[in-house]
Image: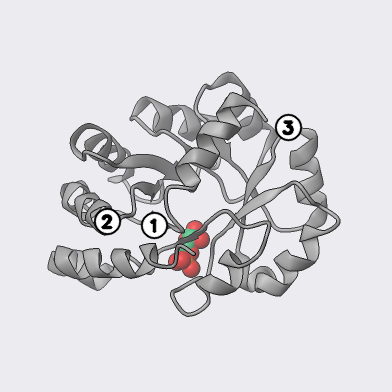
Amino acid sequence: MSAKTEALLATLKLQPVVPVLIVEDAASAVPLARALVAGGLRAIEITMRTPAALDAVRAVANEVEGANVGAGTILNARDFDAAVKAGSTFIVSPGVTDGVLAAAKDSSVPLLPGAATASEVMTLRENGYDVMKFFPAEQAGGAAYLKALSSPLAGTLFCPTGGISLRNAKDYLSLPNVVCVGGSWVAPKELVAAGDWAGITKLASEAFALKG
Ligand code: 3PG
């Protein structure tokens, strides 16, 4: 296993749930990340889906002690490089392109690439990847589908994301090929808008307690 994969795995193993954040206002990113870290969730994915996302990564990287901030929804090489420059310590993509794979190869920052089929997993394995995001987890077939991949594609580990919540997280976390899950449920829009950081710390603590 490469040093980059080991670094990625160490990050993903910090906690059973990686919060997936859509940050509308960069000013909320720091208190939001602090609330998640206070609940035990130190690895945090900020998706590149809003104009505030890069500033949010920068602010969390510089100001939130204990946080390990990554960038998600990376769709091309340009976004990969911008996210790394902003301070991301890991990169997440919903799928892959040649451009994203090339950017990852040139970077010291690890990529968690997305896959949803056996062929996509096999292609990523040929590119040297042992750890992937299974996306969109629930919609693609859920825990039963991922379990079915575990025998033929043994040796590949997944972070399933998409449609996961406290209700079904354990279905995934109990699988031998799952290292953690990702989800937005720990940072609901309404709590972020209300600045209810205590409420978010409570959700994060519940998620952290899923650690078996
Ligand atoms: C996403 O990319 O939006 C993530 O997969 C989060 O999905 P969720 O909102 O269903 O947790």
List the single residue furthest toward the top.
106
Of pointers 3 and 2, the one earlier in the residue sequence: 2
Q: Could you tell me which residue is drawn at 86 percent across and 56 percent down?
A: 152
- Position of residue 82 measured from the top left corner of the image (x, y, whole percent): 41, 29
Q: Is residue 63 left or right of residue 93?
A: left
Q: Amino acid at mark 1?
A: Pro
In the displayed structure, 194 sits above or below 65; it is below
Q: Amino acid at mark 2?
A: Leu
Of pointers 2 and 1, the one earlier in the residue sequence: 1
Residue 63: which quarter of the image? top left
Q: How far apart are the two marked residues, 2 and 1, measured between alpha carbons?
A: 8 Å
Q: Amino acid at mark 3?
A: Gly
* Disc 1 residue: CB within 8 Å of ligand 1: no
Report the quarter where the N terminus lies.
Answer: top right
Residue 149: which quarter of the image? bottom right
Helix, strand or loop status at disc 1: strand
Q: Is residue 79 left or right of residue 116?
A: left
Q: Is residue 17 left or right of residue 115?
A: left
Q: Which mark is residue 36?
A: 2
Of the pair 148 and 113, the residue shown nearer to us: 148
* Disc 2 residue: CB within 8 Å of ligand 1: no
Q: Which mark is residue 83?
A: none
List the single residue furthest toward the right.
152
Q: Which residue is mark 1?
A: 19
Cβ atoms at labels 2 and 1 below 8 Å apart: yes
Q: Residues within 10 Å of mark 1 (few under 14, many from 20)?
A: many
